[in-house]
Structures are given as C-alpha cells and as structure tokens.
Amino acid sequence: MFKIGEMAVYPAQGVGKIEAIETREFSGERHDFYVLRIVDSDMTIMVPVGNASHVGLRNLIHKDRVASVYDLLEEKHGGCGLIASWSRRQREYNEKIRSGDLFEVASVLRELYQLKESKELSYGEKKVLDLTRKLLVKELALADGSDETQVFERVEKIFLH
C-alpha cells in the first residue's frame, strides 16, 4: 500500500509520485485508485489499488541495491547471446521493460550498448536505448539521492572504455 507523497515506479513509464488516492464508482462498484504523476513526463496515471502489484507498480529500489545495478551494467556479456532479428530482440526488450524490474531494464541497456560497439543502432534500437537509460538514470538517482547528471555520466563511463 502506497501513501500520498511516496515515489513509485510504473513499468515502462518510470518514476512517479502518488498524488492522491481516489475512490471512483464503475458499474455500481466502488474502487480505490492511486493517482500517480510520472516525474519525467508529467503524465497522470490512475492505478487501481487492488491491481497495483499486478500491473507492476512498485517502490523504488532500495539504496542498498544501487551498486548491484551498476555491477550488472559492468558485466561484459550477460544473457544467452544476442538474438539476430531486430523484431525478436525488440519484443524481448519490451517484455523486460514492461516487467518493471530495474535489473531487467539494466540488462536491456547493457545489451544495446554492447551492440552499439559492433554496429550502428537502428532508429528503433536508439529509442529503446534512450528509454531504458532514462528509466534507469531517474530511478538510480532518486534511490541513491544522487544528481541525475552524475548517474548519467557514470552509466556512460561504464560503456565508454
């Protein structure tokens, strides 16, 4: 259960702030909703309280786990190898991003940076790279109490040998 004013992560959209908990009536039934304002886009999302964990709404990662995310980024070869077709990779990447798990998002970012070393990324790959980097940087900065610019630079430094 989230409280008003808390930060929460909504998969594929990023970090938001719980601005309110509202009750709405649909088909004669009353339901409570979290009103979540996404920090980066100022978008508002209403998430049913009873369905929050099912849609992946979660707390920021704990500060103690931030170093583990950086460790994952620094691993040179993760996963089971690169899937050849972009459409299959994109489907896999989107599933990982929609999972809401920051470690899955980090693994997509790492793989795209590794791919970037061997070829020019396509427009779609660049969009996924930008999205995953944005999601990761925002959450790590908030979880660690760091400046986003510092987190961004640290991530970039990992991949620029």
Image: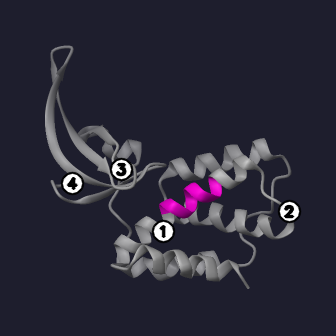
Magenta residues? 128-135
The CA span between labels 2 and 4 is: 43 Å
Residue 60 pos. (x, y %) = 35, 65
Identify the disc placed on residue 137: 1
User: Upstream in the sequence, badge 1 or badge 4?
Assistant: 4
The number of numbered badges drawn on the structure is: 4
- Tell me the kind of residue under disc 2: Lys
Circle nearer the viewer, 2 or 4: 2
Q: Which residue is mark 3?
A: 57
Identify the disc placed on residue 2: 4
Q: Are marks 3 and 1 in contact (CB under 8 Å)?
A: no
Q: Residue at x 54, y 66 (%)?
A: 103
Q: Residue at x 43, y 72 (%)?
A: 140
- Tell me the kind of residue under disc 3: Leu
Q: Which residue is mark 2?
A: 119
> Which is nearer the eye, 154 or 35?
154
